Image (tube, grey):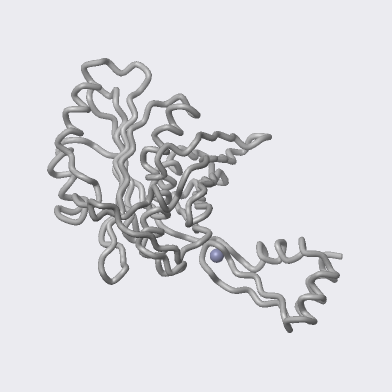
Amino acid sequence: MGRIYKALMFNDEISVSLLETTDIVNQAIEYHNLTPVCAAALGRTLTVCSFMSTSLKNNNDSLTVTISGDGPCGHIVACADSDNTVRGYVDNPQVDIPLKENGKLDVGACVGKGSIAVIKNMGLKEPWRGSCPIVSGEIGEDFSAYYTYSEQQPTAISVGVKIGRDLKCIASGGLIIQPLPFASEESILKCEELLSHFGAISTLIETIGFDGIIEKYFKDIKFDKYETSYNCKCSKDRIDRVVLTLGKDELYKICAEEGKVQVTCHFCSKAYDYQKKDIDILLSENG
Ligand SMILES: [Zn+2]
């Protein structure tokens, strides 16, 4: 289970969000068999997505983030619901590229140049859509730019994922700062002062832990607390609808050639098999 802590600080003029998403990244690694650099790229995106989910107010609200870069990992897709569950995938989870000279994972090179698109379904007639060019591909900076340009909300985002030698995630999390429109120069300066003492978020989680961060930097702050987790909501019903879009002729053709129709969920890699008799039933029920 991951955690999202949100609070207003500095005279209630600055919104601060802290996230711990280590379990979410480990679940993504387990489902997708991610290389460390892909785990970092998807993990940082899922962390931002967890944060974004707190802006969804109604039960059925959801959002989808698509990062379309020209780097070797291909698209990164992440979704979130109003219950703060997230899920995601990367086109090419096995891609590996050399570390940067400083020994860090080269997420920027893995993602490449392109654009970010965000779609929010909030029960309105049309979904809300926003987009922004990729700045560096390092994810945090890209979403900072997204919020500033597309949502007109200046936002500082620091997200980090640390992967161990066993290819599991040791620490993952985020720190997101948003000054409210009426924030004074004084509060912004105080916030910058606090941040100047703040290390890399994944290193802090690894060394002093999430509770240690709260204790050290935010001792007397009263946070709103949310749980966040990786949760795929695929079901036979949903996959049935995907299968039906292939059309009768194509379905029977695949059945004849391969013995069955198999659809694999992008988000959790679960395989759904349809034998010819299952196709018969599905088509007769939806004819
Ligand atoms: Zn699934």
Q: Residue at x 37, y 58 (%)?
A: 37
Residue 178: give x, y in percent of width and height.
Answer: 34, 29
- In the image, taking residue 27 as reference, residue 133 lies left or right, namely right
Q: Quadrant of the image for the C terminus?
A: bottom right
Image quadrant of ligand 1 equals: bottom right
Q: Position of residue 224 (x, y in %)?
A: 31, 40
In the rendered image, the quadrant that contains the N terminus is: bottom left
Q: Is residue 177 above or below residue 271?
A: above
**Spot occupied by residue 226 in the image (x, y as percentages of width and height):** 35, 47
Q: Is residue 37 left or right of residue 244?
A: left
Q: In the image shown, does 242 or 95 lie closer to the viewer?
A: 95
Foreground residue among 209 and 88: 88
Tell me if residue 68 can be seen: yes
Residue appearing at x 20%, y 52% in the figure: 203
Residue found at x 48% / y 57%: 73
The quarter of the displayed image where residue 177 is located? top left
Left or right placement of residue 263 versus residue 135 in this view: right
Which residue occupies 55% across, 71% down? 270
- Residue 193, position as x, y percentages in the image: 16, 28
Q: Is residue 92 above or below residue 178?
A: below
How many numbered circles are shown?
0
Q: Is residue 205 left or right of residue 76?
A: left
Residue 276 shows up from this direction: no
